[in-house]
Image: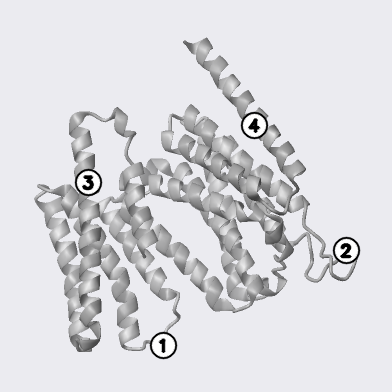
Amino acid sequence: MVVVLVLGLVGSAMAAPTIGRLTGDERRARLAHMLGILGGLVAGFGVILFFAANWSDIPRPLRVLLLLSGVVAFFAVGFVLREVRGTHPNIGHAFIFLGTILFGASVFLVGQMYHVNAHDPLGFLFWALGALAMAAVVRSGPIAALGLLSFFAFLVHELVDASVEYDQFALIPAFMAFYGASLYSLGTGLERWLAPIRFSRPMRMLGYAFLVAGLLPLTFRDAHDFANVDQALDINRVAVILGGLAATAVIGACVLAIQRWRDRLTALPEAIVLLGVVVLTLVAMLSPEVSEGAFVGGPNEPDRATVYPILFNVALAVVAFGAIVVGILMDEVWLANAGAITVGIDVLARFFAPDWSMLERGVVMMLVGAAVLVLAAAFERRRLRTA
């Protein structure tokens, strides 16, 4: 829960232009917006702790009444301050955001109180649908981010609930990569329609984060040495979700590619990269490089995956450097910064990775460093020509 709230707060902050570019009034408005959300979160934690201390002593009907009245009260106050009067839109938004959080908590608490025999992941689905609906009504990026995170929690819960087999958890990186590619491609390709309701930016930002988080584990050999997922894919529910996410990502890439005829010059290269990542991830999941129980050189010397880790390292590098290039060309500071951060994280991961020799790591880092210098020189020449 804490991670969800913090990501929502960070997403709200990053949705604005760079602070250095804002005027005095815009800075004060942004500060009020940030403080409003932060105050709402702190007050919300206080309410949760207050009731948690006495929750078991409160009769169940009164608990339900308190939860329902709390949700209604937060939404009502928020709508009055933000939509009706318009006197304190930032404080009103904080109340609505807090009401959305309390709505999700109420779904789980009511089910727990009355021991509802329902499919557990549905709680996250109801929360996601409620949050996304509220985000569309009030045009809120942070609430949209909360809904998107809740929906991913629903997908992962479905995966975990389907079986307790260890191999099934090897699918989580694929889930993240497909979900991230879907969000980024649809958020970018449908920006003209999603931007007015504040959905485009959180979809793109979370999409990039999920895409990188899914690709990074797959750059290590261990992720493929244990990724024999045949048994997991035999479970219909998991296979349907995995296929649905992959199909959504492919559709999103096609939608993004269409934008090349409009106002986004980098749409086609972005779509090609996303489509390539989806295909590579799907092939790696359906056709593992190392089968379970494969050995080489002796009964105690396991075979190691090599081709897939190299390909995913290349894919992650393309995504990271592509984000930097696209961010600079399209004047999207957050995307360029995200790409630079990804490069830094990947370099640290490669430096300490135990599954590659020091010589191999040294050669790769020299090549990456040379590529970065070439990229910097190209942009420097472009800047001098246009100066």
- Which tag is nearer the camera, tag 3 or tag 2? 2
Residue 280: x and y in percent read 68, 51
Check the image and report above or below for 97 versus 67. above
Q: Distance between the residues labelled 4 and 2?
A: 34 Å
Considering only order in the chain, which callout, 1 or 2, is on the residue closer to the N terminus? Answer: 1
Element assignment for label 3:
helix
- Which circle marks residue 296 in the picture? 2
Marks 3/2: CA–CA distance:
60 Å
How far apart marks 3 and 1 lie (CA) works out to 40 Å
The label on residue 117 is 1
Which numbered disc flags the more N-terminal residue, 4 or 3? 3
Q: What residue type is labelled 2?
A: Val
Q: Do the residues labelled 2 and 1 touch (CB within 8 Å)?
A: no
- Residue pointed to by mark 4: 369
Looking at the picture, tell me which residue is in the foreground, 349 or 186: 349
Q: Nearer the viewer, mark 1 or mark 4?
A: 4
Residue hosting label 3: 33
Q: Which of 296 and 145 is in front in this view?
A: 296
Query: How far is the residue under mark 2 from the one under mark 1?
Result: 49 Å
User: Residue at the spot x=26%, y=68% of the render?
Assistant: 102
Question: Callout 4: 10 Å neighbours few (<14), some, many (20+)?
Answer: few
Asked if residue 284 shows in the view, the reply is yes
Horizontal and vertical percent for residue 90? 19, 48
- Circles 3 and 2 in contact, beta carbons < 8 Å: no
